[in-house]
Image: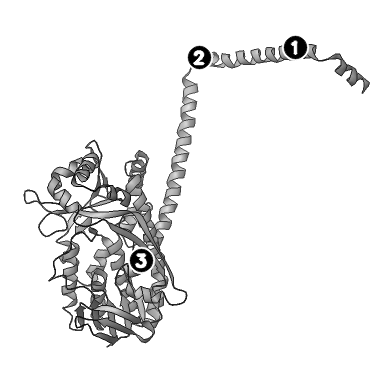
Amino acid sequence: MKRQEAEGSRLVGSLNACFLAKRNFQVDVYEAREDIRVAEFARGRSINLALSYRGRQALKAIGLEDQIVSRGVPMRARMIHSLSGKKSAIPYGTKSQYILSISRENLNKDLLTEVEKYPNAKVHFGHRMLKCNPEKGRLTVLGSDKVPKDVTCDLIVGCDGAYSTVRAHLMKKPRFDYSQQYIPHGYMELTIPPKDGGPGLHLSNKSFTCTLFMPFEEFEKLLTSSDVLDFFQKYFPDSIPLIGERALTQDFFLLPAQPMISVKCSSFHFKSHCVLLGDAAHAIVPFFGQGMNAGFEDCLVFDELMDKFNNDLSMCLPEFSRFRIPDDHAISDLSMYNYIEMRAHVNSRWFIFQKNIERFLHAIMPSTFIPLYTMVTFSRIRYHEAVLRWHWQKKVINKGLFFFGTLIAISSTYLLTRCMSPRTLDYLRRPWDWHGRNLDSYVTAWSRSHLHQIPWTVDSDLNEE
């Protein structure tokens, strides 16, 4: 039985531990923080989770899909609130398609409990990694006893998030590429309390968690409770009665706005000894709702490759990097694109018109035209293939709109000329005729006047030549 060490017991780390344990590997998970099931949940440091098809398929593979989905709240559309109070919905997909809003806390607890059901898996909480030696398959961890301990394994799996310690050690290796980018916006979580016992999102007490995204410069301008209330009254007036003035100001100053980072690296593995999954390999901004889903799909793809190569790590790890890097870089770019779209384009009539065109074409040609959001959220089409297909579809749509626009203009002009009487057309031609005759007269008069002004000496010189 091979021994696998996983760094990180949060969402992706716990899920991957289940996949490896199912293959009868001895799995040890080292988590720097305490057990979330016995600790007080730290609200305000996580983005709301939206579970979609890719994530559900990964959960289905370990038998957890039904349990998780049963506690989710379906979300079928994006609601746009205008300053005037008008509301308009942009559907995510067809009437039968929806994403699920789920509690990060409850999902993490369920995954940890599932890991512990395997006798060959163990989670070590309160163990911080000090050193990582992928060549020798060795980790040095520091537990609650404050005594460093070396552990050896066949495979180190780094699932330790955007600021991955495992990745930091791989960055010291030759030909390891890495880039990161912070966006100008930060985020802050606020709470809408339950009303009349209705269903809630994300929290166990049926309240709603909402996230405020805003440039850091704007957050820094709001220094007092009065500043906060004036700001919300100006830009989000319909949210104040739902949150409550007192709760709003308390939540706003509870924690500072949190940054959002996008991380790319290559490759995702080191020989047959170490591999990165989830945010450790590709942290993305949250504006496409694919961070968790992409991480879960990492686990599923890795498991599928383990099947393909019969658990041969020397074959599986290089193929995982080759196969997965284009997709994870593509969803990172798409998330950045959606960041711009959501902040600048959702109120544009042209944007909404394009969305309606896409939905119409998808309805009449469902296998030929598939909206980008549908490919990303409601299928397992590879992310980079979805991007290529999206660019092709945009070209076709734009050319089609240009063709029909030109056809309509030509047809309108033809019908206009056909419907006009001869007298009307003759009347329209007359100004041009008048202009032509007047121009001829003007040119003749101008020429004659200038001939009279030419000195005779010029003519004389010309004659001499």
Query: Residue at image x 17%, y 78%?
Result: 116
* The quadrant where residue 354 appears: top left
Q: Give the labeled residue for mark 1.
A: 449
Q: CA distance from mark 3 to mark 1?
A: 80 Å
Which mark identifies residue 424?
Answer: 2
User: On the picture, is 158 further left or further right than 46?
Assistant: right
Front-most of residues 316 and 463: 463
Disc 3 on helix, strand or loop? helix
Q: The N terminus lies in which quarter of the figure?
A: bottom left
Specify whether residue 378 is in view.
no
Which residue type does callout 2 highlight? Thr
Mark earlier in primary sequence (3, 1): 3
Marks 2 and 1: CB-CB under 8 Å? no
Question: Where 219 falls versus 139 (above or below)?
Answer: above
Disc 1 on helix, strand or loop? helix
Front-most of residues 54 and 340: 340
Q: Nearer the viewer, mark 2 or mark 1?
A: 1
Disc 2 on helix, strand or loop? helix
Q: Give the labeled residue for mark 3.
A: 282
